[in-house]
Image (tube, rainbow, N blue to C red):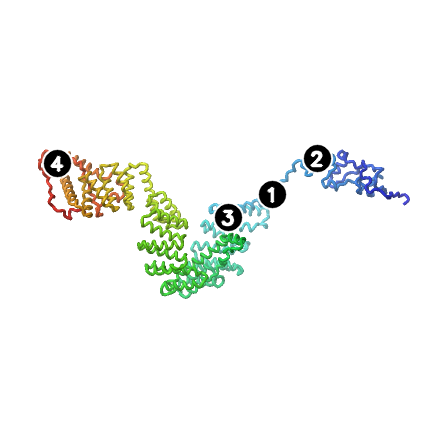
Amino acid sequence: MEHVHLTALEEEDLYSGYNDYNPTYDTEELENDVAFQQALRTSHGRRPPMTAKIPSTGAGVRSFGNMGARVPLASSMGRPATGVIQDGITVARPMTAVRAAGYSSAAYRGSTFDPLGQSRGPAPPLETKNEDTPEEKVKNLEKIVNELIEESCIANRCGDLQLALEKAKEAGRKERILVRQREQTASSDHINLDLTYSVLFNLASQYAVNDMYAEALNTYQVIVKNKMFNNAGRLKVNMANIYFKQRNYPKAIKFYRMALDQISSSHKEMRIKIMQNIGVVFVKMGQYSDAITSFEHIMSESPNLKTSFNLILCYFAIGDREKMKKAFQKLIVVPLGIDEDDKYIPPNDDPHMNLVIEAIKNDPLRQMERERKAMAERFIMTAAKLIAPAIEASFASGYDWCVEMVKASQYVELANDLEINKAITYLRQRDFNQAVETLKMFEKKDSRVKSAAATNLSFLYFLENDFGLADRYADLAMSADRYNPAALTNKGNCVFVRGDYEKAAEFYKEALRNDSSFTEALYNLGLTYKKLNRLEEALDCFLKLHAIMRNSAQVMYQIANLYPLQTFEASFRYFPSNIEGIEWLGAYYIDTQFCEKAIQYFERAALIQPTQVKWQLMVASCYRRSGNYQKALETYKDIHQKFPENAECLRFLVRLCTDMGLKEVQEYATRLKKVEKMKELREQRVRSGRDSSARGRREGSASSENGQSSYVTSAKGERMSAKLKSLPGVNDPYEASNNKDIDASYVDPLGPQIERPRTAARRRVEEDEFADEELGDDLLPE
């Protein structure tokens, strides 16, 4: 110990020596130190031994001892450091821990601060995965197969069934290639059974929806017979469904039962559905007893609406009255599994709850509840209408029993609907008095029932042409429920028959605003627009109706009728002097009993062809058909002044004067007799002229044609409707026959009558043979 010199410790500064410069730790020359740089490049920070001098001065602890021993050294910062004594010289070890943390002394000597190492340039690219290996090929194929299955399902959901089938087939082909590749790589133990099952199941499903039933059954058989697929027996239900579509009912029952045997009792709901299908198949086969057995078992295990209704149908088919009643009672107590509607009534004192109820009162769950309740009401109403005539001596007693049962159930509001159906049944049996009495019972009921009853009463009275009562009950139905489209339509019908088409159209449009699918209002609106000559709007109504009712013959007729009418209306608008269009329009309005509208077209034709007497006769006929006999008489008188030898005009004058009790009847009858006599004489002269010479025959033929041209319609006029061609007609007591007019500008085809004495001809014309005769009934037109 005598050789050991201890450092004095009295009253030394603990931080002395920290600012002393030690050349050993000078970092400025480290970049040029080859040994140091080589040590940095090694994986563990080791480097070859380096030589360094130990400073002779400085605070710290002196080191001595055997070579190779590690002793603590004092760093320039006062931290102990390790060292190695080599050849009697202590060498400091590199401080790799600080370097490994990413720090360097260069940062303190003017180098740029770059903690993220961005100045080093981009990182080297990642090594690419080798896709040529068998494992990578298998994975890629699996990915492709899964994508094809998804695309097939999406196409099916979008309705593109053909594309869905093509994708399913492509997935099947890719999956087979995948299996072969696994076999080649000796990795068959790792076959993806789930993927194979998915491919086959999707393919079978796509075959089924594309009505390729044989292919679908074959694909299902491949799945079912493969023992490696767990629970594949359930797919026999799908196979049974296909047999059901093919009407192969025995096979359908066989596969349903096979599926039922392979489904455990823990899946109760699935078993119930299969048994329900079995019952339906028995109904299709007419084996109602077997169907009843299935349905009764379901009702004992898990009663539901469809099974209960089907059970009523089976009892009705076998004619069991008592069981029909019991099944109906079971139907009205089947639980719907929905809450009461009271929960959707918002409280007034809780704004937050009001917002919640507003959000949920029409959400998908609420809509599902409404649909389920509506289905229950539909089943009950249908079952009551079905069994009411069968469970009692009369259908009225049967309805009364059903009404009493419904009143005691949760469907008490259906009792009134059943009463209204009872009245409708009376209508079908043409017992109008009982129907009216039944409906009148609802005049003091609530608004909805009152409106329905009044609507039916309005319809009844409208059918009986009692438009006053029909209008009264239509008003009552509207006052009870203004949003009842049937009531508004009945009101529009009552206004329509009074001829107020504009107001009727308003009622029809209001009915459509309340229910856009109310076809009766849409059809009547189209007819109203047609009456108002608003043809484009009428056509629009019937086209909308045709989109709803594709097979309605009445709608198609209206559309076909409107197209040519629109064409001729446009033709008359742009070319009002076209005789063909005028003829067609006039005939159309006469055919549709709108003679007033036909007058303007025939007057236009008379202006275009003033020498054609038929247009003026048609104008007079339209006045007469519309009931304006005074105007018709004046028109016939004007025609007689212009065409005094026109027999048709004289016949109408005689008839009108007779009906109106006018004194001119004798005068017009005498003139008619003269005109007919002159017509006979001229026909005789024409016949004699034809016999005398060939020239006379040729001229007579030409004259006859010319004589008819003033009244006979042209080739274009032959396309006019039968109504127009028959005007005036012999069947109407106010119409004349179809005899042709005599041209007033008649020229004798035989030329001057030299060989005949003129005095005789003059005496025959001037002589009034009928001056002293009384007009008899035989002279009046038939």
**Sequence order check, earlier mark of 4 and 2:** 2
Residue type at numbered disc 1: Thr
Give the numbered dot on residue 133: 1
Alpha carbon distance from label 4 to label 2: 139 Å
Residue type at numbered disc 4: Ser
Q: Nearer the viewer, mark 2 or mark 3?
A: 2
Give the numbered dot on residue 692: 4
Q: Position of residue 70 (x, y in %)?
A: 82, 43
Task: Let me know if residue 556 appears in the view.
Answer: no
Task: Classify mark 1: helix, strand or loop.
Answer: loop
Which residue is the site of mark 3? 153
Which residue is the site of mark 2? 112
Task: Let me know if residue 381 appears in the view.
Answer: yes
Task: Classify mark 2: helix, strand or loop.
Answer: loop
Residue type at numbered disc 3: Cys
Pick the front one: 608 or 333:
608
* Tag 4–tag 1 contact (CB < 8 Å): no
Task: Classify mark 4: helix, strand or loop.
Answer: helix
* Tag 3–tag 1 contact (CB < 8 Å): no
